[in-house]
Image (cartoon, grey):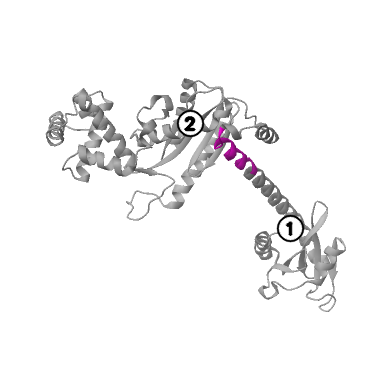
Amino acid sequence: MTLSIKTAKIIVEEISGIIGRQINMMNAEGTIIASTDPARLGTFHAAAKRLIDENLNEITVHSDTEYRGALPGTNIAVRFKDKPVAVIGVTGPYTEVVKYGQMLKKMTEILIRDEYYKQQNDTETRIKNRFLNDWLYGSPDTIDRRLEIQGQSLGIDITVPRRIVIFEPVLKTGYSEKKASLPHTEGAAEDELKPSDIQRHIDNTWKTVATMVRHESDAVTLISGNVFICALGGKSDKQLLDFVRSVCAAVESRYPVLLAAGLDAKTDDYRLINSARLKAEKALKTCLRSPSKEPRLYNTINMEIFSSEIPDPVKKEYITRIFKSYSEEEIRRCISILDVFYQEEGSLTKTAEKLFMHKNTLQYQLNKLKKQSGYDPRSIRFSSLFYNAIHFYRDLQH
């Protein structure tokens, strides 16, 4: 473990003004990597090099000519695991500066130790994330004994049947919504947040989710791009949906974020974890298309199962054919009306109330659509045409 230049500079800058002394920090090669005197940066300090090479605790320099590149003062070894890894030099008479040197030594050793454990933790996290990626995105024939053993070494028993939930944040700013992972600042409204604020909300959202998931049975998590994947053990559809709703509510009560969620279909075969993830992804896409962002179980979606296989140009042509001669803005308005209309099982009264629209205005819009498209949106016979159009339109918006 070595002393980083960044850590050395922080110590020198913070302490020099307090003690009123010249301070140097040298690495294991005897090179000055931080100093209150910029001219000395990168120069060789022979006393520091001797201290490292001979495993000494300290060296006092009495004159400018005693050690090359060293001025009068005290140089003290900084140790990590009982080995000198750096040297602190404080200029001035020994009796006046030794106490400062010892204080800096302790401070530096604490910072080096903290940096070491952080690096260790980062390394372990990367190893664990690579394993989870191989497992969650692997096909059944790759989930073998080797992967089981690797999981056991990381404290993860992959043979436990688990349910997959995938979360994705959608940022609420004023009256607008957008995926929090895709901040848009060009032409942003006054009530929209800065990219730094958006990232802070995303980070806080994931911390909240991770804290709640951590208490669940056999829980493992992975952040992949802009989604948070959770694998949870021993839950029925109802239990899983109740838990997910509680997580979404906790996030939405604290941050300007709607948390979309997709839930897989229950299976007891741990080797089908990749299939479960794919199902959760399809459920998530359905949730993202929904204005309410209500969590969706895979078993509750229907045409969305295959809609992802249809090319976007085909979807666009389908929409154009249904909404003949309509402008983009008129199509958007019609989709919004029809979406609510079908959610309310064709009730004009409930749809008008939900859209804050007069009932007569709603009837006019539906009659106009019937006349212009040739299909009556209130007819069971043609409702599937508009239902498909709604989902294709939502697909093209994401």
Q: Is residue 150 left or right of residue 251?
A: right
| Residue 390 image-quadrant placement | top left
Is-magenta flag for residue 136? yes
Q: How many marks?
A: 2
Q: Is residue 42 left or right of residue 238?
A: right
The residues tagged by marks 2 and 1 sit, at their Cα atoms, a distance apart of 42 Å
| Residue type, label 2 | Val
SS category of the residue bearing label 1: loop
Q: Is residue 245 left or right of residue 330?
A: right
| Residue 144 image-quadrant placement | top right
SS category of the residue bearing label 2: helix
Q: Which of marks 1 and 2 precedes in the sequence? A: 1
Identify the residue at image location x=30%, y=37%. 392
Q: Report the front residue among 31 and 241.
A: 241
> Vertically, is 219 above or below 222?
above
Question: In this rendering, does residue 21 appear at all?
Answer: no
| Residue type, label 1 | Thr
Q: Report the front residue among 196 and 57.
A: 196
Identify the residue at image location x=23%, y=33%. 337
Q: Which residue is mark 2?
A: 247
Tell me where residue 189 appears, x and y as whole percent. Answer: 32, 51
Identify the residue at image location x=48%, y=47%. 200
Is-magenta flag for residue 34? no
Q: Which residue is mark 1?
A: 2
Q: Main secondary structure of the magenta part?
A: helix
| Quadrant occupied by the C terminus | top left
Tell me where residue 24 appears, x and y as whole percent. Answer: 73, 67
Tell me where residue 162 appears, x and y as whole percent. Answer: 56, 26
Span of residues in magenta:
127-139
